[in-house]
Image (cartoon, rainbow, N blue to C red):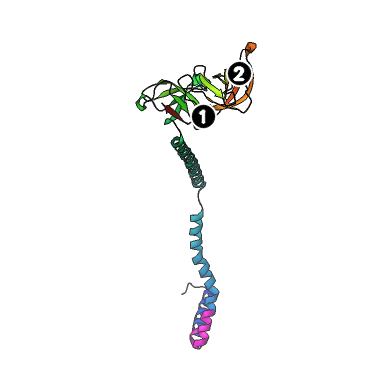
Amino acid sequence: MANLKKPHYIVLSLVVLLTLAVLNLPSQTAARLKVALGSLFLPLFGLASSSQPIAAKSVDTITPRRELVRQNEQLRRENQELRLLAMQGQEAARENSRLRDLLGWQKQSPWKLKLARVVSREPANWWRTIQIDLGGKDGLRENLPVLTQEGLVGRLASVSFTRAQVLLVGDPNCRVSALVENEKRDSGILGAAGPLENDLVELTYLPRAADVKPGQAVVTSGLGGVFPKGIPVGKIVDSRPAEYGLYSQARVKLAVNPGALEEVWVLFP
């Protein structure tokens, strides 16, 4: 006690006197004093206690930039995968619809048909040949006609055990006897129209006085022993006299788009 300085005695004395005064106050007055003192210090206690959860929460909500980049990349990949799945679903729905139409047409067709898928094209003769996924094991043989709902495609040129090559209409080696559906039933031979005209063929050896006009339909004539009569080929685009005027010839726009073939029918006798 000897070491305490005078200010310390004064403070200690005041604390003792204040304590005695509080103890001697009436009970109601003492309770009100305690409430008043508590109200002064309570906000400080509350601030101290609430600062800890706020600090913890702020630490939890701060995400490193590397993690944000990783999450963004993951979301981007998932979005691409979903888009790809949607595209595949749409393509499958289109294919199913197309196959239903093909099978419905087969039931109405007067011919015996077998459905085949186009699996490749010959690079050296891109617009004149295709390969299908049927072969000798499926009963295919050379020269069987190939067609679609729209019309004539060509004929089988070669057949292996599991595959077959189809020569398309317009190839020089795929000659087709055809006739124009007019009053005269003018007939001729289908051949190539040119290397850059993939959807056009030439109908040559028409009679010199053939009554051929744009828009008239052209079908197979049934002559030649390969293609049965009545398969649609296309429509007349224009006509002109051939060299020396010995016969007429016309350009025919094919009913079948050779660049959009996915499935074809092989016609059996």
Q: Residue lying furthest front in this view?
A: 183
- Residue 25 rendering spot, x and y as whole percentages: 51, 87
Amino acid under disc 2: Gln
Which residue is rendered at x = 54% and y = 79% of the image?
36
| Residue in the image at 53% along x and 82% along y | 33
Q: Residue 232: where, in percent of width, then height?
A: 53, 28
Q: Which residues are magenta?
A: 22-35
Residue 193's quadrant in the figure? top right
Q: Establish if 73 lies above or below 135.
A: below
Secondary structure state at the residue bearing disc 2: strand
- Which residue position is annotated with label 1? 151
Viewer-nearest of discs 2 and 1:
2
Name the quarter where the C terminus is drawn: top left
Question: Is residue 240 something one can see in this rendering?
Answer: yes
- Residue drawn at x 50%, y 83% is 31
Could you say which disc has been placed on residue 268 in the image? none
Q: Residue at x 51, y 79 (%)?
A: 15
Can you see residue 114?
Answer: no
User: Is residue 165 rendered to the left or right of residue 185?
Assistant: left
Q: Which residue is mark 2?
A: 249
